[in-house]
Image: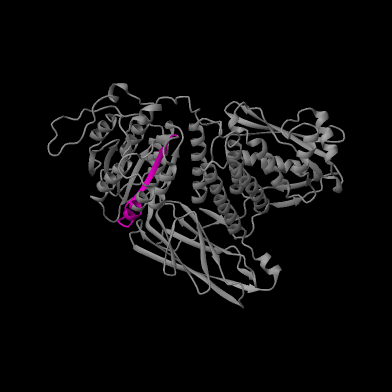
Amino acid sequence: MLRPRFFSTIVPLIFIMFVGTYLFSQDQLRIAIMDFQNLSSLSDLDYLEKAIPEILITDLSLSKEIKIVERTRLEEILKEMQLSLSGVVDQDKIIEVGKIAGAKAILTGSIIKAGETFRIDSRLIDSSTGEVILAEKKEWSSENEVIAAIDLLAEQIIKSLTGESVRISEKEPTEGVEFSEGKPVAMETALNNSKRLIGSDEPVYLQVELFSQKIEGTERIPLNISLVIDKSGSMESEHKLDYVKEAAEFVVNNLSTSDILSLVTYESSVQTLIKAQNADRKEFFLQTIRRITSGGSTNLSGGMLEGYKQTRENIKEGQVNRVLLLSDGLANRGITNRQTLQEICQEKVSHGISISTFGVGAHYNEDLMLGLAEYGNGNYYFIDTPEKIPSIFSQELEGLLAVTAQNVKIEIEPYAGVTIEKVYGYISESRENITGITIGDIFSNEHRTIVIKLMPPKNYTGSLQLAKVTLDYNDVVGEKGKIEESSILSVDYTNDKDKVEESENGFVGQNVNLFTSTVQMQAAINMVDRGEIDKARRVLNKEASSVKLAAEKYQTVELKKQILAIHRYDKSLENYIEKPAAERKLIQKKEKYGQYRTQKGKEEDEKFHKLKTPVDEKPPKPIYHRPDVKKAEPAVEKEGKHKREEKKVSQPKISTQKKLLEFIPLPKGKEKPKPS
């Protein structure tokens, strides 16, 4: 894991090179940026028409010689000309707009599909002559790549107009995280500013980062997992149950004989198809999975509780104890109250059992599934299309197979006069004067970031101790038991404003802006849930401006991705009420999941060409779909001697299986299972 050498403000390094004469004199570098046109025929990319110019403006702000015509001013001009920002295509009109706006150059562009990838085509035009100053084409296929393409385009625009050579988002010198000898987890703490202006009523932000070592070729701890699968009638549609069975087979094929597995299915009733046992009877497990059929309602609580029961029967220290719960619908049998179910999950954490949840499609309750995972110390996954089920399961399993620390907890103890106002991204619990944050399991080579908002006293003289941060966890790699370390953070009060400005920690600052933005995004999402669409869009518009300012200051990919997220969500809210109910639900689920992953620091470089399946279009069948076994009766394991000989069945080919098998470190003396 590489880290910035210093927690300094991350800004690009600008080298000024005098390479001939500049295109315009210094007082003439005023340019206008039009909305780009989406010519890809894919409406999913419409939001990039405004998002790309916003990020370009962010990048071009790095040059002090370039001034950007305000977007509101452009809109006024175009309105008078009865045009729109994205509708200008005639070059004569472009020149006219530039002249009215007082811009010496105007940038236009389009988004084009180029085979399996996409392309930005852009032109920078001299407003006085119509001459094309710069014409560039940049290909991309994911969010990270489109941001890199925009950054490169901005570099070339600055070079063409000013002669400056700029490196945008250039990485600072890095160094590895230092791990104390024998400790698999390292903690780093920092404040957004080590100085505080006397009399200030601004909060102080405390950042806690956890890093785990990359563990390779070492023994792993055994798994004790329960697969809890929704097999209600709705799982029959879109081949969802078939994809789930493929994922379950994948799990079985990647377990060793020292691991423990149970399989629970639920609909109106609950069935324990495989009682918790060592994973040494794989053929029986695979046959049982393949014979699962659908039907009935959704007794989610019953399935979850049975999964917990099966896991607890074999619970012990030194292994991963987790329930994996999948559903595509609303809990309509048994316990359905969200708070009650969350409290159950929280109580099970105290017994050493966590839960990860997988929501499939448009119709499940995402707030419930996310809440269960949050209170249950696991992970939440939104699976928009069924064909993604196996790969999502593999993500979860890959982490479980590489746990480096368990029962990870952070405690924040504020000192006299200091209060804790908010913890971002994680559920916290306060008792007496201590705020506890339960992290749960940490996997190999993982990075977690927690930001805590503190409010110190306004007036103080000298240095003030703010809080003590304590980390404790169980080392499952070196088997050294419980490990604890702590850090005390202080702030110096001063009347010198310059010292305060110079002491800002930019790395913490960019995370504060990112996490506070997720709070505003969630507020807008909640407004949409309540039907307050116009109010939500006003919040998004305001937040887009705030994040753009933060991105101009810190120039980080994460903030630029948040700009994309805000524009994507805002665009999806156009004519929201007229959209089909299933599409509206998918929009909400996608945005909630995106902000959840941002808060957890889970990087996801979404591929643009893998667009969502239209709600009225069926996804392809899974590669192993077998109609001949699909309708068979489920094989429930019987106590005692098995009367029926297990018949060997060819196993499905799963593209990610071989790769993951090569990754898995196994308990000592165990052989890796062979990929089927």
Whether residue 248 appears in magenta in the rendering, the answer is no
The chosen color scheme is one colour
**In which quadrant is the C terminus drawn?**
top left
Q: Is residue 539 above or below residue 38?
A: below
Q: Give percent across and percent down for residue 459.
A: 62, 75
Q: Give percent across and percent down for residue 117.
A: 59, 30
Furthest residue to the bottom?
Answer: 461
Q: Nearer the viewer, residue 360 or 608?
A: 360
Q: Is residue 243 above or below residue 257?
A: above
Query: Quick check: can you spot residue 671?
Result: no
Residue at horizontal 32%, vertical 22%? 627
Quadrant in the picture for residue 229: top left
Q: Give percent across and percent down for residue 553.
A: 67, 54
Furthest residue to the front?
Answer: 531
Left or right of 605 on screen, residue 222: left
Whether residue 356 appears in magenta in the rendering, the answer is yes
Q: Nearer the viewer, residue 449 or 428?
A: 428
Q: Is residue 489 above or below residue 531?
A: below
Q: Which residues are magenta?
A: 344-361
Residue at horizontal 43%, vertical 46%? 370
Left or right of 366 on screen, residue 246: left
Left or right of 380 on screen, residue 498: right
Query: Quick check: can you spot residue 497?
Result: yes
Residue at horizontal 81%, vertical 38%? 105
Q: Give percent across and percent down for residue 483.
A: 38, 64
Furthest residue to the top?
Answer: 628
Q: Is residue 458 above or below residue 88?
A: below
Residue at horizontal 36%, vertical 44%? 664
Total numbered badges shown on the rendered structure: 0
